Image (cartoon, grey):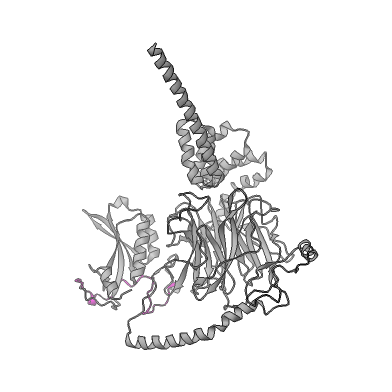
Amino acid sequence: MISRFTFLLLAACLLCTDALMAQNKKDLMKEANSLFEAGKYRSAVPLYRQILMRDNKLDAKLGLAHCHRMLKDYEEAEYWYELVIPHRPNDPKLKLFLAQMEQSNEKYDEAKKHFLDYAKVDPEARIFAEACDRVEEYNEGAERYQVQIVPFSTAGTDFGPMFSPKGLIFCSEKKAPKPDGLQNTSPQDKFTDLYSTEKVPGNAYSKPQRLKGKVNSLLHDGPASFSNDGSQLLFTRNSAIKSKDKTVNRLEIFFSDLKGETSWSKPRPFVYNDAKHNVGHPMLSPDNTLLFFVSDMEGGYGGTDLYFCERIDTFWSEPLNLGPKVNTSGDELFPFFHPDGTLYYASDGLPGLGGLDLFATKLTDGGSWQEPKNVGAPLNSPRDDFSFIINEENSAGYFASNRKGGIGDDDIYYFKLRDYKISRSKSGYPFKKRVKKDKLPEQKKLSKKEQQELAMAGKPVKPGAKSKTKKPKAKSKDKNSAKKPGNTQTKTNSKKPKANKNKSTNAKKNKRNKAKDKKPAPKEPIILQPEISNKSTQEQPEKKPSEPISTPSNNAESKSSSNNKTTEKASPKGSNITYKIHVGPYPAEDINKSEVERFKDLGGEIEYSADPIKGTSIIVGTFEAISISEYAQTFIKGRGYKKAKVVVYIGGVPTDIKLKTLKKQGLK
């Protein structure tokens, strides 16, 4: 009797356990699907895998395939789609996704087959099947450009380079951890801020700095561009917008004004921001009359399309779609309008090598756009290539890519035409002299219907118009009140004489202080310009003793002044002090010489010092500033060579001097 009771109890417990496990699986799947729908793909992956450890569930495999596709993990996505498709023969879209993954993995024959399979449902897919036969065509002329990852790329996400009046701005993952309490985010979410780097003497860039002021927020910020005088910043911001029952994330465009030399004012929203759709990636034409941007607003041709607004007096025209020649059923992103009238952008809806490819088009005399042209390799690759910019001379520029060989999720690359003398101007874009009164519009041009509705309601036709009885601080939007928008400007200018007096007084004090203390002011740390080394002497900048130069020093330095024993009294002003990076030692088979060749672009030649017992050391240099050598050390360590240290040379001879000693003595 007891044994039977025990058996029944155990059976009941097992049934309860099975039911509980089934409930857990159901809850896990629901949670994983919710995370996927919210765009939290990294968070959804471990849940789908957890389900598969308990049950060989097809929906979990499909979830993994979709997550890895969205995370740009093409090999993993291909693997899971191959497992799912035989069990889902009636879902043709899966074959399209598989074809896209195979194309990005350079399996063009397999990709062509699956594109043709999908073309039975959607004939437009034939152009992608044909593109698989044009790989050689897209790679023609690839040798015309030299392409190099920039030294300031990180192990995270870097993209959106844009010329600034003094160098570059770009997007990069926040260095600080994500603040707590943000809605619709998870610990795996990573957010980007806008950073700037300035061009300094010696073909170098300063250490990237987060933009000052009110531009960067808690969520994503960037990409961005400038007005033609550099005084106004247009940028994309990820905004959390609350609706009745939930909070949605939307991309919006904002404007900010330069305050002083480096800070930015509180952003103002673009008039066509809307909670119903996304707008982003703003780009102004060189004359500030056309504003190009990206949006998924209704009436487009695909996922995201390219639009533009025309500047008319003090307002923006209604957004106009660039039409079916430019826009496709896919996504068009990251417009860049060149001074010669060429519009560059990224698209995954046109045939190419795979993923997002870069395209170029121009307006014809008749007002229509030319057929977009794929810019080809090496600027395009089988992976995503986007956020392309090129200098005024069409000789060099930057773009972002998640191609193989990078060091992060997305990396910024520098390119230049081979054997072309690069301009040493601070910016590659024709910025004009700052014009403070040329403020970009904050109004939109109303449609006839909107104007009629306002007129019938007895309201001013122009949006935002103020009554004359209002306080003088309020900005008037009245067309005839040309002086009123300048009231704020005039008020600002009225403070300038005082500021100038203070500046002149301070200048006199500074002059007297300098006369007493001739110690040189500290210079900002600099890093090498991401320029590919070229032995042509035309590209080498003229050396100036007072400036740290990022080009290699002459190895045949006079050894008569060499001093093998370094003392703490070493002169910090000695021009014979240089630096090299000693990497290693390592076993010879652990050194990837093709990878080490990249170190040449940091400055100087690569030397090898072999020791039969300790192993082989790599010596990189020469560098003429501590800050440059320290950056080079960080860069080399980031490539996996952890045993990299800066060695101080005097007269071309290595010493045991520590950098701290030289820094204390004022050497930069």
Residue nearest the observer in this picture, 214 or 430:
214
The residue shown at (55%, 66%) is 390
Task: Report whether 406 appears left or right of 641.
Answer: right
Residue 168 versus residue 438 in the image, above or below: above
The image position of residue 325, as x and y in percent, is: 69, 56
Task: Report whether 469 appears left or right of 11.
Answer: right
Residue 491 lies in the magenta-colored region: no
Quadrant (top left/top right/bottom left/bottom right) for the N terminus? top left
Viewer can see residue 73 = no
Quadrant (top left/top right/bottom left/bottom right) for the C terminus? bottom left
Residue nearest the observer in this picture, 466 or 428:
466
Residue 547 lies in the magenta-colored region: yes
Task: Report whether 141 appears left or right of 468.
Answer: left
Image quadrant in which you'd find residue 485:
bottom right
The image position of residue 549, as x and y in percent, is: 38, 73
Residue nearest the observer in this picture, 582 or 570:
570
The image position of residue 316, as x and y in percent, is: 69, 67
Residue 525 versus residue 136 in the image, above or below: below
What stretch of residues is rendered in magenta? Answer: 539-566
Main SS, magenta residues: loop
Image quadrant in which you'd find residue 623:
bottom left
Task: Report whether 238 appears left or right of 640.
Answer: right
